[in-house]
Amino acid sequence: MKKIMLLCAAVLTLVGCRQGGGNDDNQQPETINNTHQMDTNSHKRMVILNASPRKDKNTATLLKEAQRGAEEAGAEVQYIDLIDLQFTGCRSCMACKRTGNQCGGVCAVRDDLRPVLESIRDAAALIIGSPIYWSFPTGMMRNVVERLLFPMLSYNSDGKGGVQRYLDKRMNCGIIYTMNVTPEGYKAMNYAALHEPDREHLEQYYGHCEVYNAYGTWQFYPDYEKYDHSAVDLDEKQWYRDNQWPRDKQAAYDMGKRLVTMN
Ligand SMILES: Cc1cc2nc3c(=O)[nH]c(=O)nc-3n(C[C@H](O)[C@H](O)[C@H](O)COP(=O)(O)O)c2cc1C
């Protein structure tokens, strides 16, 4: 009995929204049509998420440029290294779909990501930066996207052929990807098709999402000579470092500025 009570307490602690929890497929979700009211300063608040495990390399460098751009435009920026947080992707607990749930479009699971998701709910702009790992954004980024978007989606019809949302929110989003491949490799491996769904879903839910790709990044710090690299075209890497990288930083800076100033 004591064991059962402890288990119940653990489940209630994990899943935060009232009337949540459980995976009861017979329940029809009732939509809380929640148009989120941002506070008066929120048009100037941006959240930046670094989904690289490295806190000071390519992705982080570009994200810090984006932060500088946003701050110079007068925004307040919350910069988060996801590697410091303990969190998972969606657990499919269905708490956010229960009839009468009060999740308000924010994931019910109480782990380190929850306050970040609440902060994003109240922000005006969001940038996620990720390296490409085995053709895709990192698991950290994918986990965030799952937890960010699924709680907003209702399975109730909107009566116009679509579905309702638990949270109706407008936010300017950007994604910055860094990767080893050159634009030619990107095209040959059809990365655009692999990466487009995340952009598309963020745009669908928040109204705007743009992507910047930084190619041919400098992977081995401090220099390639300390690592096995005979298959790497070092001249090409150096060219990207000297010529393209400054442009990447400028583009990231511009993205930061643009996302907090555009409507
Ligand atoms: C596990 C792993 C897998 C990778 N897979 C790819 C890949 O599929 N395509 C690619 O272009 N680069 C790939 N890379 C290279 C990184 O995307 C690239 O170096 C990135 O700029 C690293 O970002 P960071 O400096 O912020 O860590 C991979 C790197 C690692 C560690």
Image (tube, rainbow, N blue to C red):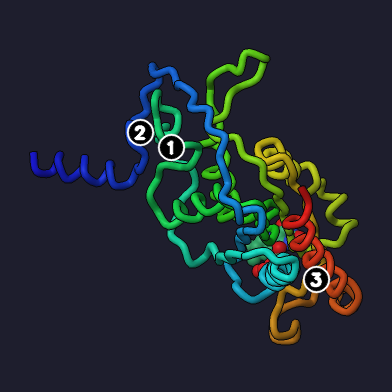
What label sits on residue 103 in the rendered view? 1
Q: Quadrant of residue 128?
A: bottom right
- Secondary element at image label 2: loop
At label 1, the amino acid type is Cys
First of labels 1, 3 by sequence position: 1
Which quadrant of the picture is home to ligand 1? Answer: bottom right
Image coordinates for residue 34, horizontal then vertical, percent: 53, 32
Residue 115 in sight here: yes
Distance, label 1 to label 3, CA atoms, is: 38 Å
Q: Nearer the viewer, residue 47 or 129?
A: 47
Q: Amino acid at mark 3?
A: Lys
Q: Earlier in the sequence, mark 3 or mark 2?
A: 2
Residue indicated by mark 2: 20
Query: Left of 260 or right of it: where is 240?
Result: right
Is 41 above or below relative to 53?
A: above
Residue 19 sits in which quadrant? top left
Q: Is residue 215 left or right of residue 163?
A: right
